[in-house]
Image: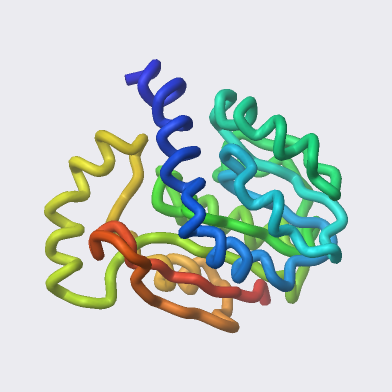
Amino acid sequence: MGIYNDQIVPRIVDVACGSKLNNPQRRRVCAGLQGRVLEIGFGSGLNVPFYPAAVQSISAVEPADLGWKLAAKRVAKATVPIERSGLDGRALPFDDNFFDAALSTWTMCTIPDIATALAEVRRVLVPGGTLHFVEHGLAPDSKVQLWQHRLNPIQKALAGGCHLNRDIRGLVETAGFEIRDIDVFYEDGPKFLTALTLGVAVSP
């Protein structure tokens, strides 16, 4: 499983999350980012083309060495400085109130202790700082939710611990963030995989 998670899963994620179908959501979620930005689950740098001009720097948290390697060309073309600054969202190596904004795209599904990670994100954001997120997770429809619960063990085994059925809004609010904007919808494809939550939350 170590070789699979280290060498195969990052390539699967790069291809699956790199679909052009995701570009409109990346553009939406990155809109309004500014200043010093923390990106958790940087992956292969698929958000790089969508950073607004107001972003001053990106601190990339990415545990997979292969993911960072796959990001090299995108990082080289970036118009803002990007530094790999951490390996684990549950223990961020930054002072309190350090970042103006944070970004998470298709990441909260996989972090083992997501509650701790979101608490860390809130800690390092300035008061009034924003968390921008787009995540797949618990569907709004009970019939789809039933299939998500059934298929979740298979998904976790095949996709590096990825969960189908996490309640994204609930997780963000439980971490103490205040939701400013949120949109729950389905992308094209199987509903158990494509129920998305896209929003901006504020750190009090």
Residue in the image at 82% along x and 60% along y: 55
Quarter of the picture containing the N terminus is top left
- Asked if one can make out residue 85 in the rendered structure from this viewpoint, the answer is no
Residue in the image at 33% along x and 65% along y: 188
Q: Count the numbered circles shown.
A: 0
- Residue 8 is left or right of residue 51, and the answer is left
Identify which residue, 13 or 153, lies in the foreground.
13
Identify which residue, 197 or 122, lies in the foreground.
197
Identify which residue, 14 or 1, lies in the foreground.
14
- Residue 173 is left or right of residue 59, and the answer is left
Q: Is residue 57 above or below residue 5?
A: below
- Asked if one can make out residue 126 in the rendered structure from this viewpoint, the answer is yes
Q: Residue furthest top?
A: 3
Name the colour scheme: rainbow
Quarter of the picture containing the C terminus is bottom right
Q: Residue furthest front?
A: 20
- Res 15 → quadrant: top left
Residue in the image at 25% along x and 35% along y: 157
Residue in the image at 39% along x and 60% along y: 136
Q: Is residue 181 above or below residue 47?
A: below
- Res 53 → quadrant: bottom right
- Residue 136 is left or right of residue 27, and the answer is left
Residue 58 at what x, y percent from top left? 77, 49
Q: Is residue 151 above or below residue 173?
A: above
Residue 67 at what x, y percent from top left? 56, 31
Q: Is residue 84 above or below residue 194?
A: above
Residue 64 at what x, y percent from top left? 54, 29
- Res 74 → quadrant: top right
Residue 121 at what x, y percent from top left? 63, 56
Identify which residue, 140 or 72, lies in the foreground.
72
